[in-house]
Amino acid sequence: MKNVLQYTILGLLNENNLTGYEIYKEFNEVIGEIWSAKHSQVYNELKKLVNDNEIIVDNIDKSSKVEKKVYAITDIGKKNLYHWLENAVDVENTKDPFAIRVYFFEKLKKNKKKEILVNKKEEKTKNLEELKTIYGTLNKQDDLQHILILKKAILREEAYIEWLEFCLENV
């Protein structure tokens, strides 16, 4: 059974042939709003996908000092990607380390609790502003997939800020 990271890589390669670095860059620039991956994770998954014949090294770019492998999806990879897209049962990740801190910070002084919550609210507000700025630059015709993901991220941040305001009112 594949993990979401492998399917994400297959999805990216289904759009364009990419180097490992370009795939990692997509995680930082677009997909990172809903799914994160470390550099080492991406490269480990690329190896697995090559071994499973779901992707191939289509080309080796030798134009720079470092050789760059360019990956392409195979027919097997496409078949597995489409099957997952059509049939996957998704389990959302509800882990939130900050919420655990809030759950256990009862014994802290009131001003310290408020400081923790205000700091988190400032962080989330800044992130929300950045997301809205990016969202405002996108074109619905050309960037629909990015818009769909950013809207989810914006709503997530707005809900988190609303929860933080609720916490501040009640500590």
Image (cartoon, helix red, strand yellow):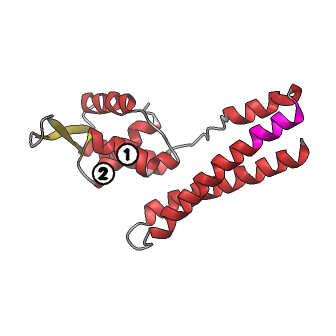
Name the residue at 74% across, 31% down.
Answer: 100
Name the residue at 47% across, 46% down.
Answer: 32
Disc 2 versus disc 1: nearer the observer:
2
Prevailing secondary structure class for the magenta stretch in the rendered image: helix
Q: Is residue 57 visible?
A: yes
What amino acid is labelled 1 in the image? Leu
Quadrant where the image shows the C terminus: top right
Q: Which residue carries the number 2 mark?
A: 14
> Quarter-wise, where is residue 70 in the image?
top left
Would residue 27 be counted in the magenta stretch?
no
State the image coordinates of residue 72 (x, y, percent, origin top left). 22, 44
Q: How many marks?
A: 2
State the image coordinates of residue 134 (x, y, percent, origin top left). 48, 62
Would residue 110 be counted in the magenta stretch?
yes
Whether pointer 2 and pointer 1 mark residues with C-beta atoms closer than 8 Å, the reply is yes
Frontmost residue, 31 versus 14: 31
Frontmost residue, 64 versus 12: 64
Name the residue at 50% across, 43% down.
Answer: 35
Q: Which residue carries the number 1 mark?
A: 81
Tell me the SS state at disc 2: helix
The relative height of residue 49 versus residue 78 in the rendered view (above or below) is above
Q: Is residue 16 left or right of residue 140?
A: left
| Magenta residues (range) | 109-117
> Quarter-wise, where is residue 5 in the image?
top left
